[in-house]
Amino acid sequence: MRKKLELLEELQDIDQQIDTLKSAQGGLQGELSGISQGVDTAREDIALLEATLAQRESEKGELEATHAAELENIARSETNMKEIKTNKEFQAVGREITAAKKQVAELEDQLLQKISQIEELSGELAAKRSQCEELAENSAQRVVEKQTEIAKIQSDIDADVERREGVIKGIPASLVKKFTVLREQRRGQALAIARDGYCMGCNMQLPPQLYNNLYKYEELLACPHCQRILILKLQQQ
């Protein structure tokens, strides 16, 4: 019975080590996702800026076309004025030209605003692209580092799993099943140390007779409070 308890204790140590390794591996996988998300977000920002810049360029093109058309209308009206014979018609065309010139001035103001916006967006876009390129380069290096760490942990997990299989071979299948169920029910700890009359798993006092029977190693004994399998560990002097 002592040998079975030793094997169970070794099995628990291995399982807890595997749990720790898997937790660390999961954390690294989360970091990998975060790295990729950072690059994706930067690229989304760039795409949004590119779309905005394209829209401003399109608006600028429309303004330029309207501006050119208004200038052409003014030139045509000024040419026509030379052929006008009545004062009334002359004044009417003059008013049209004045209104058109006012429209041209407004269009030119709008064009200057668009040009300013385009220059600002272009500068911001260039900076974002540079930052994204640097981020992608750094991220690629970090990804390699994290993947290397993950692979190393997986190698350790595989080694522990192989060692676990070797330990299980020395334990009856029914006992392995009981251990597994307890481990699931007791947050990864199927065994508990018994010391000085107490169960260290739940910190409850054990019945004296049960505690005394632990010294005999005649059978597996469990804590009546938390049901964990008990392993006697005497206080070191």
Image (cartoon, helix red, strand yellow):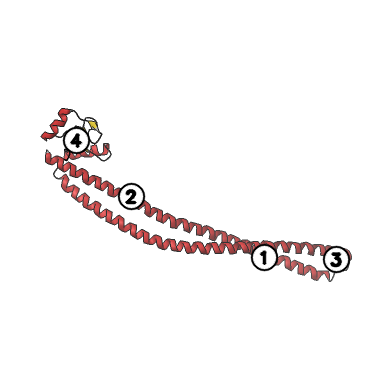
The structure residue drawn at horizontal position 47% and vertical position 58%, both measured from the top left corner, is 42
- Which residue is farthest right? 86
Query: Quick one: 2 or 98, which is closer to the camera?
Result: 2
The structure residue drawn at horizontal position 75% and vertical position 66%, both measured from the top left corner, is 73
Quadrant of res 175: top left
Residue located beneath label 4 in the image? 194
How packed is label 1: few (under 14 Cα within 10 Å), some, or many (20 or more)? few
Image location of residue 193, percent across then percent down: 20, 37
Q: Are marks 1 and 4 in contact (CB under 8 Å)?
A: no
**Mark 2: which secondary structure?**
helix
Q: Earlier in the sequence, mark 3 or mark 2?
A: 2
Query: Quick one: 69 or 20, which is closer to the camera?
Result: 20
Q: Earlier in the sequence, mark 4 or mark 3?
A: 3
Q: Earlier in the sequence, mark 1 or mark 3?
A: 1
Task: Mark 1 vs mark 2: give the one in front.
Answer: 2
How packed is label 2: few (under 14 Cα within 10 Å), some, or many (20 or more)? few
The image's mark for residue 65 is: 1
The image's mark for residue 26 is: 2
In the drawing, does residue 235 fall left or right of residue 152?
A: left
Residue located beneath label 3 in the image? 90
